[in-house]
Structures are given as structure tokens and as C-alpha cells.
Image (cartoon, rainbow, N blue to C red):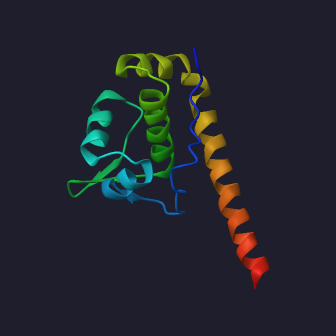
Amino acid sequence: MQTAGPSQPDLPAIPSKRYFTIGEVAALCDVKAHVLRYWEQEFDQIKPVKRNNRRYYQQQDILLIRQIKSLLHEQGYTTSGAKQWFKSQQSGDENICYKELLRQTITELESILVTLKKR
């Protein structure tokens, strides 16, 4: 089976915030808000914080959503196939998210370094 490539160069960098609204996540992942709500029902791994009837996602949620999008839209998995992929990857799933979060942080730090060198 193929491995999911969570790093998608055409998507914007994830800002260093703690919480994101569903609209922000939709823009960061290039999917519609109703698709995110559907994926929440289908994938138990997506667990946004709900306050005052609003959803707030964290960075690891965004990385997971990008991985789901990659499985479904780029690698041709069905929803049930993607669920099975996550079950088979359950032990290594956190490692994938943490590695992607580290890659994202490194990219942001390199961008800051370039900006500082220009001054």
C-alpha cells in the first residue's frame, strides 16, 4: 500500500497559532467547510475543540486533514480505504504528524532567517 505524503507544496504554510476556525482550515487545506464537517464524522482522528457551537482546530488537526485529502484526492483511496490505512498506521500516525509539524516549523524558521538576513 502507498504511504500518504502529508507535505503538499501547493498548500499554504500553517501559521503559528493555537486554534483555527473551520473557515481558516478550509482555506489552509483547500477543501470546503462542509467537507471538513463530513470528514469529522467519518474519521475519528479529527477532533476539533467545540466552544459556543463553533469548531476550533489545532495544527495537528490540519496536518491530519491534509493527509486525508492526500489519500482521497491524490492517491485514489476511498473513504473506507483511507480509514483502513489509518488503522494500519495507528502506531506510527503520531510520528507522521510530529514529523510534518517539525518540517513546517523548520520551513517557517528558514523563512524568518531569510527575512532577517535581508535587513
Number of numbered discs visible in the structure rendering: 0
Outermost bottom residue: 119
Q: Is residue 98 left or right of residue 64?
A: right
Q: Residue at x 31, y 36 (%)?
A: 40
Place of residue 100 in the rendered image (x, y in percent of width and height, measured from the top left): 62, 43
Q: Residue at x 73, y 63 (%)?
A: 110
Outermost left residue: 53
Place of residue 72 in the rendered image (x, y in percent of width and height, measured from the top left): 42, 28
* Towards the viewer: 10 or 113: 10
Quarter of the image holding residue 84?
top left
Place of residue 46 in the rendered image (x, y in percent of width and height, measured from the top left): 39, 38
Q: Residue at x 43, y 40 (%)?
A: 65
Question: Does 20 sit above or below residue 102?
Answer: below
Which corner quadrant holds the C terminus?
Answer: bottom right
Question: Does 88 sit above or below residue 94?
Answer: above
* Towards the viewer: 32 or 20: 32
Question: Does 45 sit above or below residue 112?
Answer: above
Q: Is residue 45 left or right of residue 21?
A: right
Which corner quadrant holds the N terminus?
Answer: top right
Q: Residue at x 69, y 66 (%)?
A: 111
Question: Does 50 sit above or below residue 71?
Answer: below
